Amino acid sequence: MSPDFFASRWVQRPAHVTDADGLAGGFRAGAAAAGIKGHGAIDLGLLVCDSADAVSAARYTRSGVLAAPVLVCRDETTPNAMRAVVANSGNANAATGPAGMAAARAMQQMTAQAIGAEPGCVAVASTGVIGVPLVLDGFQAGVAAATAALQRGGDEAFNEAIMTTDAFAKRASLDVQLPSGMVRVSAQAKGAGMIEPAFATMLCFVQTDAALEPETAELLLSVCVKRSFDRISVDGQLSTNDTVILMCSGASGVHVTAESEDELRLGEALDALLRMLAIMIIRDGEGSKRVGRIVVRGGAGEVVERCARAIANSPLVKTALHGADPNWGRIAQAVGAALHGTAPLMLDIAIEGIAVCAGGVAVPYDLDALNAAAAGLEIEYEVALGPVSDPAHAFETEVLFSDLGHEYVTINAEYTT
């Protein structure tokens, strides 16, 4: 892991968190070629918890078209007791009907046999092209090779196996000092395109050697996903395969009880970890050059959320971000389109703290300073939907998003050709 993992001003490293190497205690990972991508490419990743009493929590895409592996995980794994993940890249196994379900179950069963576990303890994940049958001719040999390669330092190979259009790996291992002792949290993620904050076309697998009750694991994952993967967008496109899984081995001997200082400190670490991985996904947004953060404040939660997502998903805003063009009129247009019929809207806009619009009217600003601010790699936009009648009950939300450039079009125009 790079020493500058927390390389965004929007994510602060918690004081009790230090960098580490390798998976959390009680976990091993490996990877192999299973013939799904072809040409000997590493396309099968295996992650195993050695504890039979592992506790897990998971979140999945809310798409109306669910990939077969998502259905198998959601409906055919033992709740809160997953202790292994098998993941492939090169084929999403989505929109593949009964044959796709049979393939996902076969992946689960062959993996369970290889590692000596019950099928219901094995999660399945896939990423790649939608609508293409998943052929498993090389899977059994691949999962056997991945099983033989299992090691605590196998997270790098595992991360390689789940990448598709990713330009770089997204993983981290952190040691977390809790009041009751030291624990480790590790994670591996993939994602670069088809990203929409609900949550994102991505896979993320998180491990900790802390001991958690199922309810605590569910709570921590739910809160942290809402503040990370639920807050990002590359292109406004919701995926069929989104999966986030947290597994807890308990190997550290540190038991994290509900509503304790341990839970708070672990939650802070997990929150920072997932937020940084989320930013890495949009930073890798298929040709992305810059990352934007839109913060919207106002008097109604649904309204500020709608505005923030409209701005983050606006092609005009995103292309302006790509070109370092501080054209705030694009932001005003996106808000107006999201809130049609509300004129005159008393709108305040600032870019990198420089006010450009107040009460719906342009205000004088230093153009040179604004151009310089817009040329950075992380750009923050602020929008206030005012005036707010009751500031104490005003709402605020954020969306982190990538720009939109020429390479995004090239990648997606040629995705299957």
Image (tube, rainbow, N blue to C red):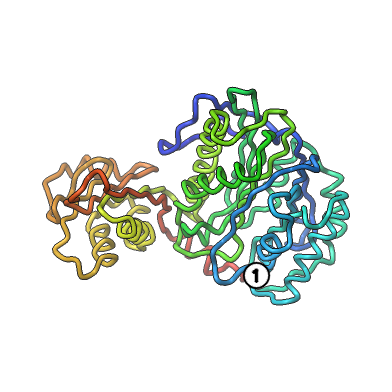
| Residue 2 image offset from top left, x and y in percent | 58, 33
- Mark 1, residue position: 94
- In the depicted view, which residue is nearer to us: 153 or 405? 153
Quadrant of the rendered structure where residue 247 is? top right
| Residue 354 image offset from top left, x and y in percent | 21, 42
The secondary element bearing badge 1 is classed as: loop
Quadrant of the rendered structure where residue 86 is? bottom right
In the picture, which quadrant includes the N terminus?
top right
Number of marks drawn: 1
Q: Which residue: 45% across, 37% down?
A: 11
- In the depicted view, which residue is nearer to us: 58 or 186? 58
Q: Residues within 10 Å of mark 1 (few under 14, many from 20)?
A: many
Say whether residue 121 is left or right of residue 160: right
| Residue 17 image offset from top left, x and y in percent | 55, 27
Quadrant of the rendered structure where residue 240 is? bottom right
In the picture, which quadrant includes the C terminus?
bottom right
Say whether residue 284 is left or right of residue 85: left
Q: Amino acid at mark 1?
A: Ala
Say whether residue 254 is left or right of residue 275: right
- In the depicted view, which residue is nearer to us: 223 or 227? 223
In the rendered image of this protein, does residue 132 appear above or below residue 87?
below
| Residue 71 image offset from top left, x and y in percent | 67, 66
Q: Which residue: 61% across, 41% down?
A: 171
**Camera sees residue 107:** yes
**Camera sees residue 169:** no
Q: Which residue: 73% across, 38% down?
A: 249
Say whether residue 4 is left or right of residue 55: left
